[in-house]
Amino acid sequence: MPDPILNHETTDGVARLTLNRPAKRNALTRELIEQTLAAVRQVRDDPEVRLLILTGAGSVFCAGMDLGEMQARAGDDNATEEWQRDSVVYRDLLWELFTLPIPTLLVAQGPALAGGLGLLLSCDIVLASEEAFFSLPEPKRGITAAVVAPLLAYRIGPGQAGYLLLSGRSLSATDAQRIGLCHELAPAATLAEHEAELTAAILTGSPAALAQTKRHLLTGPAASLPDWLQSGMKVSATARETEDAREGLAAFLEKREPGWFPGMC
């Protein structure tokens, strides 16, 4: 029997979700996104859970969307509808994480890329390995990070967000902490110890006070995020229909440089 692609455990009021496709760098298939969304909703409805921890198995937290699955959609007769569905379920997962009424802790034991960075941005507190790095390489594949962009701008501001979205450059864990993507860093060898200490610190807070704090934060700048995420979902799905997207994804899977089409925008 194959291993589950998502592990879900709850102990002493702490729910732990672990992306479990290490051989594929925990790339997000539609099935994995749907399972994670269902698990987050299960946590939301459990009054005994006080903290959600999200992490990944293996050396990479999450490499983003499964580009092989995305490329395969291009051959479907209803490719546009399928890409739209993928964007909707991903958007729903980010929003469920972002609005969960309990604290969320993301532990990045390794790199968080593309859609994986979106998961990180949806969580309240981020603990990362010092060896981790972060990037949004979507334009190099001919696609966009339009669903991630609103959360990125909310967390670190439009200027820093534009740099990451447009440059395609990677950030080290140290630089990510400097601009606010990560809150705490730890050596890989002691990451579990730091996670335990941070978990204990979060659990010292009153559940009611923490829930009130999160509700209060949602009445500020985050109030505009639903509309921005809705727009981003449409942009993300539309971008996958372009010739550049087909070329970018094919080039990535074939391990070659893409040949962009002049005048396409």
Image: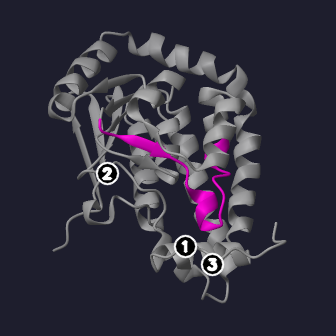
Comparing labels 2 and 1, the label whose residue is closer to the camera: 1
Report the span colored magenta.
Answer: 131-149
Give the residue pinned by disc 2.
Answer: 60
| Residue 162, horizontal then vertical, whole percent | 69, 39
Residue occupying image coordinates x 66% and y 43%: 149
The first of marks 3 and 2 along the sequence is 2
Labels 3 and 1 touching (C-beta < 8 A): no
Comparing labels 3 and 1, the label whose residue is closer to the camera: 1
Give the alpha-carbon distance from disc 3 to disc 1, as whole Å: 10 Å
Give the residue pinned by disc 3.
Answer: 247
| Residue 198, horizontal then vertical, whole percent | 28, 19
| Residue 229, horizontal then vertical, whole percent | 69, 45
Label 1 residue SS:
loop
Is residue 197 shown in magenta?
no
Determine which of the numbered discs, if any, sits on residue 257 in the image: 1
Q: Amino acid at mark 3?
A: Glu
Could you classify mark 3 by the number of other residues whose Cα lies within 10 Å: few (under 14), some (14-19), or many (20 or more)? some
Up/down of 139 relative to 67, above or below: above
Report which quarter residue 262 is drawn in.
bottom right
Report which quarter residue 29 is drawn in.
bottom left
